[in-house]
Structures are given as structure tokens and as C-alpha cells.
Amino acid sequence: MMSNRSWFLQLKPIPATVTEVRKEADDVCTLCFDAPMLDRAMPGQYVMVWVHRLDEVPMALSSYNAITIQNVGEATRVLTGMKPGDIIGLRGPYGSGFGIKGSDILIIAGGVGAAPLAPLAEACASRGIKVTALLGAKTVSDLIFVERFKAVGELMTATDDGTEGYLGPVTELMKDVNLEEYDQLYACGPELMMRGVLDMCAERGIESTLQMSLHRYVKCGVGLCGACCIDPDGLRVCCEGPVFTGDKLVGSELGKYRRDASGRKTYPWGRE
Amino acid sequence: MTDISTEVTGLKVRSPAMLAAGVLGTTGTSLRRIAVSGAGAVVTKSLGVQPSEGHPGPNLVEVDCGFLNAMGLPNPSCAAFLDEMDAAREAGVPIIASVIGRNAEEFSGAARLMGGADALELNVSCPHAERGYGASICSDPDLLADIVRSVKGSVKIPVWVKLPPYVDKITELGIISEKNGADAVVAINTVPAMAIDINTGMPILGNITGGLSGPAIKPISLKCTYDLYKALKIPVISVGGIAGWEDAVEFIMAGAAAVQVGSALHNNIDIFREIETGIKAYLEEKGMTLEAMRGIAHRKT
């Protein structure tokens, strides 16, 4: 049999002009851009954002033409300071995206982790899927996309300081709903929150109905450099993820460690 | 079924197709995954005595004939990587540690730290390394000789030297490597290259320039293998644009003892099994052995 010789998609970064900047929270903003090539992007996919003369960083699409950025480092600081008319480069969309299925779904979002979940909620609702969302953040002003989630389904909120909704982590809200009733569960947020969601699903034996979007150091975006591989199966977050089903993550490094830009293991959540 | 297991510098491999350095080699479990998927051997990410974060992005850009990358040799350091070796070993295929340095002392230090690997591959050919590392070593034949000799004196395992694609000089570099004790040469590293964003006029890679891999460099690499096979007694391990069993066969016909695959993994994580199956079927059809096929192109001129 001849080998399949199909090779390249010819994806150089394409230029995109910022058309609108929306402040979502103290250190979070949404950049909308003109990038028609992203029309085909699926919720959960991401783009490699080239901040000229500085770096290139992976960003989940928060709508087909927008990214939502938290200021956590040099590149994100420049991005959060951008104005309409500024130009960035975009490679993508990359990654697996969320699989849309079932007729009744639960979304669990923490902080800026709501970014890929808001377009998912909208895509599901537009297909007649019933959407329930649990949204958590540190404080009321950090709850993002409240209106977007409310517009397409039921929303429950939680804040660490009790300034809105339930006082405590968003995973506590999961205890008030019957997780087994949902056809699919979708989660994105801080890693320990996602670990908590995974553990709760695994305890109930429903981890394969859970889809989670992971964060790892993504450099090449096309599954070659290996910077984003996760243990223990060597799955590539950049192209086989960032969305994985829970059954692929039980027993993984999630919530235990991750690797930095050099590939060294780091333990931001403490060593067991 | 035809046997395509072979021996390269004393290492027994079940297939002549190996994972190339720099690709999916940062973690032990990713090396294990590729080994389990059918690679005859796997080469780690290039490791130095000190950890490095590599260049700022963009680190990779797709061009119409391949990939352009300037990772900048990010690596967790030899010492940190020892922790990854256990998982990599579980698949039972040889692990080749790619090592970097700026001089004989640094190379030997890295080599000793990775002395538990099955072989070493000296990266003296990366075109986008920090000053003093990578390809700049090959512009100084004495330095190359010094490094190879020194590493050979520091470890007991086979030492392979990965050469840059300097088409007119590569046999000379191969001869220097061989004379100073190298057990094999690996050819070729990526080809110095760049891409510019015509909308802004800016070079795209964070490092401005990088290395080209993929189909564009295959014929270049093939000529290097052909020339090296003729000039050297030690084995030539070929790398550059191999994306299917037909390519592997072509390189073996040019004299390759084994081949390495990198860029083609981006859309085909199962490529090693396919190459293995493809070569076996080809040899069966032709009624030939792997050894009989090796270097056949030299006998057909």
C-alpha cells in the first residue's frame, strides 16, 4: 500500500486586526478580531497568538472571532493592553475542541476557564440542547460571561468570598445537582478545580461523559515538539487535546504536576 | 513475515525506523508511546548540563514545503531527564540520548550524565541554537574532533554524531567524526531557513531564523547519505523528510543503516508501524533482505 503523502495545511500566521476590546474583569479582557478563517472553529479549539517581537501563546477561542485573556505574564500583559486597530498574528484553529452530544448538559467553569465554555453553551443551545452552567470565581467582579450563560440556559454561581451566589468553590455546587442526569459534563478552570470535577465524576463512574479543556505549555501547536505531552500516556495537549474525556485523565498528572518551558516538572499545587 | 530487525552500532533494533531527536522526546512517557507505536529506537530531546527554556515564540511555522522551527534547544537538563528515562525504558527499545554543549568539557559532562542510555547522539548541527552551541561547532573542525574524542573517552556506549546539511562539507565532517572515534553519523539536521510575514515585514520565528524539515529536505538528505556511505566505514543513520516506507526504502538503498522520522509524526502518529509493515511487504515482494537492499543504489550505477 502506498503511504498517504498528504502533508501540509500551509498555515503561516495570518494577520488579524483587533476590532473591539471588552473588559470582562479586573485582569481579564476579550479581544475581538477580524479573522474570517476562524469561521470553522469549534468551541474548545484554540489559536496560537503571535504577539509581535515578543512571543506566541495559545489562547482558547471565546467566540469564533475572539479570545479572552487573563493577564498572567508578559505576552498576556501586552494583549490585555491592546486597542482596536492593533495587529496580532494567528495560527489555527488548533486542537480537538469539545464534542457536542446529548440533549441535557452540565457546564462547570472556573474563572477565565469560562472562555471556551461560553461558545460551547451557545452552540449547544442553538442545537436545542438543554444547558445548565455552574460558574465560579474568586469574587463577583471576576465572574465572566454571566449574561452569555444566562441567555442560553440555567446558571448557578459561586464565589470564594460569597459576594455572589454560593460561598465557596464551584465544585461544591456540583453536590446540589445529580451529575448522573446529564448526558455530558464539560469543565474548564483552574487545574485543582478540574481535578476536583474529575474525581467527583470518577467516584460516580461517569468520567467518560466528562470533557475537560487542559492548559499546558504549548509551543509548536502541531504535535511535534513534545512540550505539552502529559503523563502517563504521552498525550499531546496541543493536538489530541486540549479537550480530553475524563477516562483519559483518571490517574494522569492533572492536579499533581506540570512541566515548564524547559520540560522540568513543577509542582505548583504542592508535592504529595 | 520478513525480518527487518537490524543492528546499529551494536544496538539491536526490531525496525530500522527510529524517532528523530527533538520530536516528542521531552518526556519519558511520550518516548515510551512512540516506542510502543513501533519505533526501532527513540532519540531524546537534546539535553545539556543546564536546563534551558529555548527561544521565545513563534517556535514553529508551517511553510508550503515543510516545517520551519526555532525551538532553541529547550530542555530540562540531563540531571532532570534521568527521572524521565525509567518510563522511556519500559517499552524495551534502545534509548539514544541527544546531548549538547559548547565544547569538549560540556559535551563530556552531558555525556557522562546520560551514560545510562543505550547510545549518545552528539548534536553539533542545530541551526537555531544559542551562540556556541549546535551547528557553529561544525564550522571548526578541530573543535568537532576534540568533542568527539573527548566524549568517546568519557563513556562506554556508542557515540553517534549528528551532522548539519552542509552538502559540500558533510563527508569531511563525517571523516573527522569517524577518525576521532564516532561509532555512527546521523545526517542531516534541519536546513537553515526563514519565513517573513508579508503583512508586517517581520521575520516570523521568534529567533528570526530556524531550521527547515519535511519533504523539501528529503532529496538533500538522500544525497548526504549517498556521499557519506561512500566515504565512511561507520554506519550512516539518515534523517530528513522521511514520511512513509517508500522514503525509508530509498534511504536504505542509498546506504542508510537506519532512518529517523520527525516531522511526519504531526499528522501520522502511527507512522512507525506503517513503515515497518511497508518495508516488510516490499522486501517480500522483491524477495530481498534488508541487508541486500542496503546501499544497492551504489551498485546500480
Image (cartoon, coloured by chain):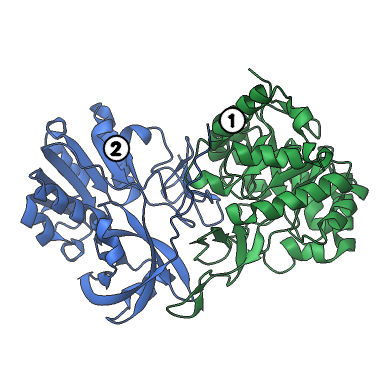
Chain colours: A blue, B green
Callout 2 secondary element: helix
Pinpoint residue A20: horizontal percent, then vertical percent.
22, 76
Residue B201 is tagged as none
The answer to whether B286 is drawn above or below residue A150 in the figure is above
* Residue B58 can be seen, yes or no: yes
Callout 1 secondary element: helix
> Which residue: 82% across, 41% down?
B298
**Screen quadrant of the C terminus of chain B:** top right
Q: Residue furthest front?
A: B301
**Screen quadrant of the N terminus of chain B:** top right
The amino acid pointed to by label 2 is: Leu
* Picture quadrant of residue A201: top left
* Residue B82 can be seen, yes or no: no
Label 1, on which residue? B278
The answer to whether B135 is drawn above or below residue A247 in the figure is below
Compared across the picture, whether B294 is left or right of A217 comes to: right
**Residue depth check, mark 2 versus mark 1: number of the one nearer the observer:** 1
> Which residue: 16% across, 34% down?
A183
Compared across the picture, whether B29 is left or right of A201 comes to: right
Compared across the picture, whether A56 is left or right of B243 comes to: left
Label 2, on which residue? A198
The answer to whether B144 is drawn above or below residue A254 in the figure is below
> Which residue: 74% across, 58% down?
B164
Could you tell me how far apart the alpha carbons at marks 2 and 1 are, in whole angstroms?
41 Å
Q: Residue furthest top?
A: B1
Pinpoint residue A57: horizontal percent, then vertical percent.
42, 63
Pinpoint residue A180: horizontal percent, then vertical percent.
15, 30
Question: In this view of the protein, which residue sits in the foreground, B152 or B65?
Answer: B65
Chain bearing tag 2 is A
Compared across the picture, whether A217 is left or right of B216 comes to: left
Crowd tier of the residue under label 1, counting other residues whose Cα lies within 10 Å: few below 14, some 14–19, many 20 or above: many
